[in-house]
Amino acid sequence: MAKNTLRCIEGTKDYFGDEGKRFTKALAAASDTFWKYGYEQITTPVFEKTELFARGIGEATDIVEKEMYTFKPSSDFLTLRPEGTAGVVRAYLQHNMHKQGSISKLWYAGPMFRRERPQKGRQRQFNQVGVEALGSDDPLLDAEVVSMGLSYYQSLGITGIKTRLNSIGCKECRPEYIVKLKQAVEPILSTLCTSCQSRYEKNVLRIVDCKKCADKTKDLPASYDHLCTECDEHFSTVKMTLEALGVDFLLDQSLVRGLDYYTKTVFEYTSSALGAQDAIGGGGRYDGLVEELGGPKVPAVGFAIGVERVMIAMEALSCCNCSAPLMIYGIGLGETGHRCMAGLLARVRSAGFSADMDYEGKSMKAQMRAANRRNALLTLILGESELEKGIVVVKDMRSEEGEQVEIPLDKFIETLKGMIPTLK
RNA sequence: GCGGGAGUAGCUCAGUUGGUUAGAGCGUCAGAUUGUGGCUCUGAAGGUCGCCGAUUCAAAUUCGGUUUCUCGCCCCA
C-alpha cells in the first residue's frame, strides 16, 4: 500500500467509486435546486489577488491570518481561494452586473483551499456549492436563501438538519453592541481561556461563540437584543417569513461566524451525522462587502455548503442510491464476433443506451460474469452462428431465467427500446 | 500550530510470552458447465508486515527515529 511514493497531498482526496458517485450527485442536486430558485451559475478562477481575500474576508480572521495558500509568481501576491464569495463579488463588480438594474442571483461550485489540520469533514482542498443574491436588502430574500439551503439537503435525502439563526446587526448598531459586550465581558475576562483574552481586543464577538467558555458567556448580552430599529425590523420579518415558509430554526446568540463581512442575518446548518465539524453549511447577509471591495452600496445574502460534509451525511444516512446501472453489455465471441460487437454497440449508444463490452478476449462465461457484475439490464450475444444467420441474441439479465430472443440485426434496436422503458 | 490513535494481500482485519513456510473473509482470475451470469464446490494469483536504525542466535511482534493516514483542539463548509 505504501510502496507507491506518489500520493496526493496531505488534506486532499481522490473521489471515485461510491464516493465519486456521491460527489457527482451532490453537485447535480445543487444545480437542480438553485435553478428552481432562479439562480444562474457563475464559475470564477480558483486563484485571485491576495488583496481580494484580505480585504473581503477581513485581515483579522483566522482564514486570512494563517490558513491561506499564498504565492508570488511575479509582482503580485496570489492566493488559492479559501471561500467563494469574494471572487463572485469581484466578478460582479468587474462585469458591472450592478448596472443591469435587477438583482443578481448567482450560484457556484468548486474547490476551496485552506491550510488547516485535516480531520473528519475538513480538508485542505475541499469543495463548496454556494449562492449569492446581490442587489436587494429584502428580508424575504434572506428567508428564501435559508429555506433554499434546506431544500437542497432535502433533495439529497439528508434529514435531521438543524438551522441556527442570529442577527449581528449592521455598521450602525454593531459598534454599540460591541461596547456593551465589552463592558459585560470585562468583569469575567480573567476567567476566560487565553484565546478569548486575546479576542477581547481583536474581535470580541468571537468570545460569544467560544465553546470552552460557553458556560461563562451564556448570559452575555445577545446581539439580537441590541439591534437598531432597521435591523430589528429586518430580523423580525426574516423570522416571520421563515415561520410562514415552515422552516424550523433555532435562535442562537452565540452564532457569530468567523468572516468579517457578515451583517444582520447569519445562519448555519448543522447535522449530527458529521462528527466534530458539524456545520454542513452556513451563510448570511453581507451588505457592506461590495462597497468594501470598491463598488457601490449593494446589499447581498448568500450561503456556502460544504460538499464533503454533505457526502459524509449522505453516507451516514445511506441516501445514495446513486448508480444508474449499465443498460447493455455486449458479448462478442471469437475475433469476428468481438469486432462486430463494437459496431453494434456504436448503434446502441447512438440510440441513447449506455453500453459496454469486454476488451480482453475473455471466454463467454467470463463476459457473462462481467455483465452480471455491472448490473447490466440486457446482454447482446454475437458469435459465428449469429453472424451467419444475421441475428443477435438479446438476453434479459433482470430475471432469474434470463430469457433470450434472436433478433435480426437490422431491427434489434427497436427490440431494445421495447425492453428498456426510458429511464430518467 | 498542539494533542490522542493507527499503518500486515486490491478491501476489511487476525497474528498468542519475539521462534523457522505471515493467515482469514470479501474481491479478482480459472475450472467444475466445447457458446450463457447470479447459488455452490475446487484451485490459483496476490505481501521487502509504512520507511530507517537499534537490541537479539532470531523481530510483523521489543525500543528509538521518521513518514503517512486518522480522530480531536482551534476555526470553519
Image (tube, coloured by chain):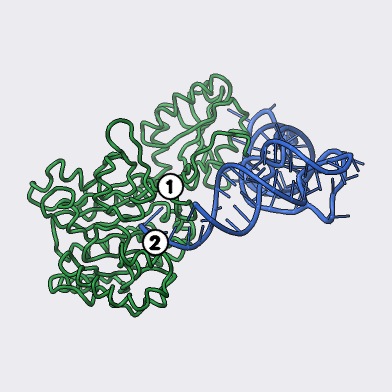
Chain colours: A green, B blue
Q: Is residue A244 left or right of residue A310?
A: left
Mark 2 surroundings: few (<14), some (14-19) or many (≥20) residues within 10 A: many
Instruction: Where is residue A127? Give x, y as percent.
Output: 38, 48
> Which of disc 2 and disc 1 is earlier in sequence?
1
Q: Tell me which chain the residue with mark 1 is part of.
A: A
In the image, is residue A77 above or below residue A133? above
Q: Is residue A228 left or right of residue A160?
A: left
Residue named by callout 2: A279
In the image, is residue A154 above or below residue A408? below
Residue A185 shows in this picture: yes
Q: Residue at x 53, y 27 (%)?
A: A382
Q: Residue at x 19, y 52 (%)?
A: A105
Q: Amino acid at mark 1?
A: Arg
Residue named by callout 1: A124
Q: Secondary structure at mark 2?
A: strand
Q: Amino acid at mark 2?
A: Ala
Instruction: Where is residue A374? Give x, y as percent.
Output: 53, 41
